[in-house]
Image (cartoon, rainbow, N blue to C red):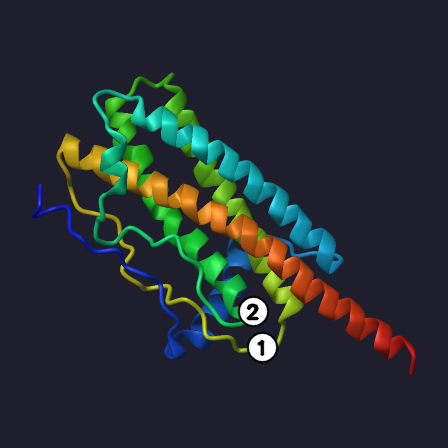
Amino acid sequence: MSGHVKNMCPQLTISQAARTLLSLLLAIDSVSAGVVCRKQPCGSSLQRSLKLTKLIHKESVDLLKTYVSQGDMSELFCQMSINNVPDPNISGLDPSERMLSIYSHCKAFLPHLKRVTEQQTDLQPPSSSLLSKLSTAHNRTNGLANQINCIYQTLFPNLPIPPEPVDGPTSVPPSQNVFQQKVYGCVVLKRFKEFLSRVTRELRTLKSQVCTRRTTFADTNALF
């Protein structure tokens, strides 16, 4: 097992060379996914994403419990470090960088959630509640990424922020045996839950920082 489970915890780090790339990808994602970004007040758009994040986090807690309850799983497996599974920590020094970090992490988790779903499809009956919960987590996370995309474009339309690298070490693993699949899925779902917990706190902070600043700036301009 040591050959497959490594004591590594890759982190998505800021890359100067990827500045323009992710800004372009944000715009391309909106077009290709048919996402229409409507201008909304700063507070209401962030509050909407915060509510969705809370919902996904609540469901992720239940999802992890359901996953661990399948077969002979132990929660100790969820604490193992596996190469290429996204790190749950959000990076960045200012609000725009941290918002891009949230977006990049959402996109990084999507292929892993999809892979876990595919693996469990081979192990679970079609009526399994686990499969339904995994599918819901994937779809909601994709929706959250689209919302963060729109918020970033609205708040920072012309700002070339150094983003998280989209080509970081988060590729899905090759073929695995059943035990390796169980460990991999458990680690993915645990880090996913931890990431959502961090996003909840981060969006609260961003709302107080960014929206307050924009409101103050607008009020000042109205005086002239």
Tell me which residue sits at (37%, 24%) in the image.
Answer: 66
Quarter holding residue 194: top left
Is there any visible trace of residue 133 in the rendered image? Answer: yes
Between the C-alphas of marks 2 and 1, the distance is 8 Å
Q: Are marks 2 and 1 in contact (CB under 8 Å)?
A: yes
Disc nearest the viewer among 2 and 1: 2
- Which amino acid, by three-letter code, is at mark 2? Ser
Quarter holding residue 176: top left
Q: To which residue does mark 2 refer?
A: 96
- Between discs 2 and 1, the one toward the N terminus: 2
Q: Against 131, is 8 above or below?
A: below
The number of numbered discs placed on residues in the rendered structure image is 2
The local secondary structure at tag 1 comes to loop
- Residue closest to the eye, 212 or 113: 212
Q: Against 19, is 9 above or below?
A: above
- Residue 197 position in % (x across, y down): 49, 46
